[in-house]
Image (cartoon, grey):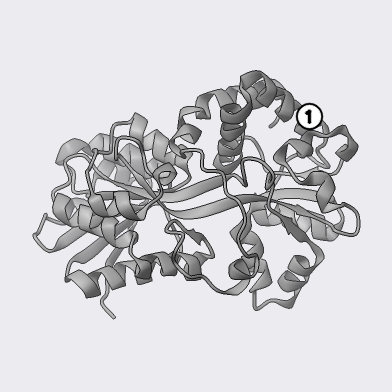
Amino acid sequence: MPQHRRFALPLAALIAGTALASQASAAEELNVYSARHYDSDAALYAAFTEETGIEVNILEGDSDQLIQRLTLEGEAGPADVLITVDAGRLWRGEQEDVFQSIESDVLNERLPAHMRHPEGKWFGFSQRVRAIFIDPTEVDAEAISRYEDLADPAFAGEVCIRSSNNIYNQSLLASMIAHHGEEDAEAWAEGVVENFARDPEGGDTDQIRGVASGQCNIAVANHYYYVRLANSDNEADREVAEKVQIVFPNQDDRGAHINVGGAGVVKGAPNEENAVRFLEFLASDEAQALFASGNYEFPAVESVEIDGVIASWGDFKKDDLNVSVLGENNPEAVRIFDRAGWR
C-alpha cells in the first residue's frame, strides 16, 4: 500500500514555519493540513495515491493551530487542502479567508446541496448525528423524541451534556437558532441548563458513560462515540453501550441535527489541480465507504452502502439545513450560552 508522509504540528511550528514548508511544490504532490486524527484516514490518502500516483504529505494539528498557521503563511504557503471537522470550524477557516472557491461538477453532482458551501469554499464529506442517549429503564424514548424536549422541566436533574465551549454543542445551538430564532433558542438553552444532572465535564463518551452509570438518565453525544463503545474489544465498554438506547431526534419534523467532516482548497494552493482532484476523490464510493467503516460516520453520498451498527439503525430523517448556517450562527450561539449560564 502506498505510504504518505505525515508530520505532527507542534505549537512552535506555527512560528518556525518548518515541517511542510520545506516540501517544494511538485506536479505529483499534494500537501494536506488535517485536523482529523483518525488512523483510518491513512487509508484514504493511500487509496488516493494508489489511484492517481499523487503523493500526499500530511501536516497534523488541531483546527485552530492549522488555521492560524495558514493565516501566517498566506497564499505563498505550501498547503493545498485543509481538512477539519464541524461546520463551525470550517466557518472559522472561511472567516480567516484561507479557502478559495472552486467549481466541480463531480462535487455538485455527488454531494447533497446542504453539504456544500454555497460559494464552493468547502464541502462536507461525512455526516455526524448529534443524538440523544437514554436509560430505557428510566426514560421513555417517546417522551424525549426532540431536541426541544431536553429543556422540558419534567427532566430536571437528568441531562448530561458537554460544556458550551464544545464546537459540537455550539453547532447544535446554531441549528436551534436557525429553526426557532434567537429568543426561543436562548429559552431552550436556559431550560437545558436547569435540567443538568451535573456540571458539564468530559467528552462525548463521558456523557454516554454517565447514563450507563446512573449519573443521569439522558445524554447528548455524536453517534459514532456510541458505536466505538459497542464495537470495543473492552467488555466494559460494550456493557456501557448495552445499557443505553440511542434516539434520533425530530423524526416527525426537521430530522436529526447533522454536522460534517469537511475540506476545502486553500487559497494560493501550489497544487490546485491535485487538490480539486483529491476533494473529488473524497466524494467517490470508495472514499465514502472508508469514512463509514473507519470512524463509523455516515457517508455524505447517501447511495453508498454501509454495514455494521450504523446500518442496523436503518433509514432515519436527517436535517437538511445547509451546514454553512451552523458557522454563520456560531457567534450568537456562543453569546447565548454565556447568557444562559451554560459553562
Q: Furthest residue to the front?
A: 252
Q: Position of residue 258 (x, y in %)?
A: 55, 47
The residue where tag 1 is placed is: 191
Q: Residue at x 43, y 36 (%)?
A: 324
- Which image quarter holds the C terminus? top right
- Specify the quadrant of the image occupied by residue 98: top left
Q: Position of residue 315 (x, y in %)?
A: 60, 60
Q: Is residue 203 visible?
A: no
Q: Furthest residue to the left?
A: 27
Q: Residue at x 19, y 50 (%)?
A: 21
Q: Nearer the viewer, residue 179 or 329?
A: 179
In the image: residue 24, left or right of residue 14: left
Q: Secondary structure at mark 1?
A: helix
Q: Position of residue 333 (x, y in %)?
A: 58, 27
In the image: residue 248, left or right of residue 156: left
Judge whether 84 appears above or below 51 on screen: above
Q: Residue at x 30, y 72 (%)?
A: 47
Q: Position of residue 332 (x, y in %)?
A: 55, 23
Q: Is residue 106 visible?
A: yes
- Give the amino acid type for the residue marked by disc 1 in the picture: Gly
- Which image quarter holds the N terminus? bottom left
